[in-house]
Image (tube, rainbow, N blue to C red):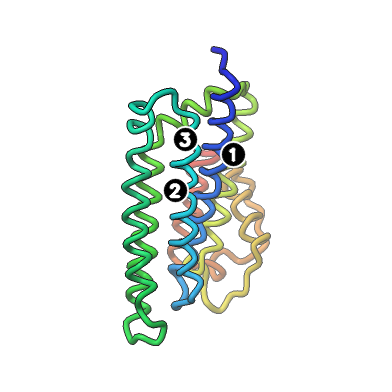
Amino acid sequence: MRYSNTEKLSNYFDLFILFIELDIFIWVLFELSYVFRPIVYEVGRILVIIYILEIIVQFFFSPSPKAYLKKCWHLFVSAAVLFLLFNRISAVDTSHRFIFIYSKLFLVSVEFILFAKFLLQAKRIREIYKSFKVNPAQIIVLSFAGIILIGSFMLYLPYARNGEEDMRYIDALFTSTSAVTVTGLVVVDTGTAFSRVGQVFLILLIQTGGLG
């Protein structure tokens, strides 16, 4: 199947936006483990800008208004909801006694919106995947690399580690690689460096990788 230049540009743009949103999704997971920080205000602002950018760009890529609305209706809904949530959280003073709770509710809402968008775009992600010529060997390598990268972020989450252990990201990356490839090599004591949640992540990585 041949793709026009417009379709290729649309695929690259959607893939670029997907990576940005995935980065934000992972960052919010980290942020949920910390006390309130004013930087959470930027999450809503950045996502609203991203959605508005998507709405504008997709208008030029869509062949007809009907196809445009069918493809982008969820962007309008997400942008509107995020805008309302952002206005609510930004109106709360940072010294408010319940700002911690409000900020966590806001971040959880952001995670839910992003996750819902990923699900709604599952078909679109498959279309983008089919537009790239990838052989079976590359699929295997990319699959392992993707699992290792996601696993390293999971193991580096604050609630996946014991508070007393000072771990570098490279240690989490090496541990994730070892778990996925089932080599048994370690750079930290997995019994003490990781919490129960982190140890569950390790088991899942072992099962998903070499054993799965």
Does residue 100 sit above or below 140 in this rendering? below
Which residue position holds label 2? Answer: 51
Q: Residue at x 48, y 76 (%)?
A: 37
* The N terminus - image quarter: top right
What amino acid type is highlighted by mark number 3? Gln
Label 3 neighbour load within 10 Å: few <14, some 14-19, many 20+: some
Front residue (pair 186, 1): 1
Pointers 2 and 3 in contact (C-beta within 8 Å): no
Q: Residue at x 61, y 66 (%)?
A: 189
What amino acid type is highlighted by mark number 2? Tyr
Q: CA distance from mark 2 to mark 1?
A: 31 Å
First in sequence, mark 2 or 1: give its number.
2
Front residue (pair 116, 179): 116
Which residue position holds label 3? Answer: 58
**From the viewer's perspective, is the residue at label 3 or at label 1 nearer?**
3
Number of callouts: 3
Which residue position holds label 1? Answer: 144
- Percent across and percent down for residue 35 are 45, 78
- The answer to whether residue 188 is left or right of residue 118 is right
Res. 155 mark:
none
Q: CA distance from mark 2 to mark 3?
A: 10 Å
